Image (cartoon, rainbow, N blue to C red):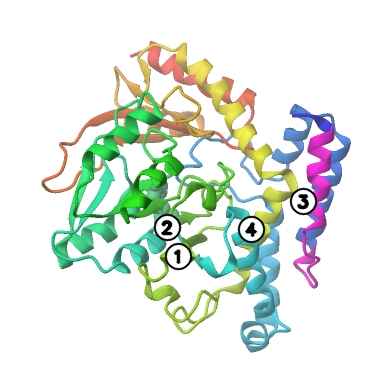
Amino acid sequence: MERRSFVRHLAAGLAGLPLLPHLSAAANEQLQSLAADLRTLAPGPAQWRRVRDEFNYTPGLIHLNCGTIGATPRPIVEALCALLHELESSPYHHTFEGSGLYGRIEGVREKAAAFVGAAADEIALTSNTTEGMNGVATGIDLREGDEVLTTDHEHGGGMVGWQYMAKHRGARIVQLRIPPPARSAQQILDLVAAHLSPRTRVCFFSHVETITGTLMPMARISDLVRPKGILLVCDGAQAPGMVDVDLKALGVDAYASSSHKWMLAPKGSGLLYIRKEAQEQIHPVVVHSGFGAYSASVGTRSWPQLIAHGLTMDFHNAIGRPQVQARCRQLNTYLRQRLDALPHLRCLTPADPELSSPGIVTYALDKGKNGEIAAQLHGQHNIWVKPAAGTYTLPGGLPHEDYNALRFSTHIYNDEAQLDHAADILGDILKAL
Ligand SMILES: Cc1ncc(COP(=O)(O)O)c(C=O)c1O
């Protein structure tokens, strides 16, 4: 990345940081100081080393499983603790009065909306993707025989709401098989088109799917299904914080995500988007009384948690969302080069950058068991990767395919030396099989 553009970006990002009063202002100072340091450092490794200094890792731990859970930067952890102290110094005042913490919450929702390219009255702050997706699925008036088209690469957190609607409303879930790896966006579009029927009411796909990290061509799918009046619902658990998400450009009607993954927010932080024009058709109870962070629908919540969620967005903005995305991809490309050279591994993630997410790559094992190798990696070497079992199965749906795979997630707190070490250790394990 060009140094000047990085510095310009930092200055712009920081100009937008709110000046927080009280104890949690320390986080703001730490983000300012991170940005100031990044301005003076040479572009590349020195800057990313400085970013890595913001994390609280146990020395020696190599976390390559952000797809399951991210690592929250130290300034955010400290701010969360400070905010909890602040709340408890005067609980009623901070929970219900505008001059307390409560007064900052709507600002978090506005910040979240800007983070994903939406308007504030399209965004709700949730606890995770599962909560958001359950609300969307059960908030659509599905009738007996209405079809929900999805894939065999979804996660239970996105699927369970549709399964509930199948059981209790008689909706029908239709799965298409994602080829591992998919060859092109056109191949996926053709599969979607071939599975649509006059009864299709909803298309439900992950933005970045959880097994192979395939980046679904959502904007092109939207062009295909919106003219037919089909709702496009997206599971974004694996995207914001890795992909610089622009929801309007994606053309989705609803989108739920988990900010405790790639966005690195405190655990139990999520976003739900419902496009304004789709709000008449998608009505989860969570936004029944309005999109406000506090509403009759959601009741009392933990403001420290929500404010810290917003501060994590400031952390990303201070570095730059495109810069974070580029770094995830740079590390992932590096890791792919290393892993492509190892025996017994077959890459399941598309090679086409239009279809491969910046930060996830998955390899099937031709020898050995994924669970045992993952356990060996973390038990003996403190290297954390995700065993990826295979396709999501439904009663009467597509047959289960066992991928016996390992999924690797690369984020800004990793570096090339860690990836070399992980590849060396995995190589030794595989050669000994
Ligand atoms: C695609 C996808 N959807 C949903 C989830 C569930 O996320 P959460 O437990 O944060 O709701 C995950 C978790 O890995 C996921 O990968």
Q: Is residue 172 left or right of residue 387?
A: left
> Which is nearer the N-term, disc 4 or disc 2?
4
Q: Is mark 2 within 8 Å of ligand 1?
A: no
Q: CA distance from mark 4 to mark 2?
A: 17 Å
Tell me the quarter of the picture where residue 419 sits. Answer: top right
- Which is more N-terminal, label 1 or label 3? 3
Secondary structure of the residue carrying tag 3 is helix
Label 3, on which residue?
A: 13
Indicate which disc, 4 or 1, sits on the residue closer to the N terminus. Answer: 4
Front residue of 392 and 272: 272
Looking at the picture, which amino acid does disc 2 mark? Asp
CA gap between label 3 and label 4 equals 12 Å
The answer to whether any part of residue 424 appears in the image is: no
Pointer 2 local density, CA inside 10 Å: few below 14, some 14–19, many at least 20: many
Q: Is 5 placed above or below 26 here?
A: above
Residue marked by disc 4:
114
Name the kind of residue labelled 4 in the image. Ala
Q: What residue is disc 1 on?
A: 277
Q: Nearer the viewer, mark 2 or mark 3?
A: 2
Q: Is residue 203 left or right of residue 328?
A: left
Q: Quadrant of residue 63?
A: top right
Which amino acid does the dot numbered 3 rest on? Gly
Q: Amino acid at mark 1?
A: Glu
> N-terminal of the two: label 2 or label 3?
3
SS under mark 2: loop
Nearest to viewer (mark 3 / mark 1) = 1
Q: Earlier in the sequence, mark 1 or mark 2?
A: 2
Cβ atoms under marks 4 and 2 closer than 8 Å? no
The alpha-carbon separation of the residues under discs 3 and 1 comes to 30 Å
Task: Name the residue carrying label 2.
Answer: 253
Label 1 sits on a secondary structure element that is helix
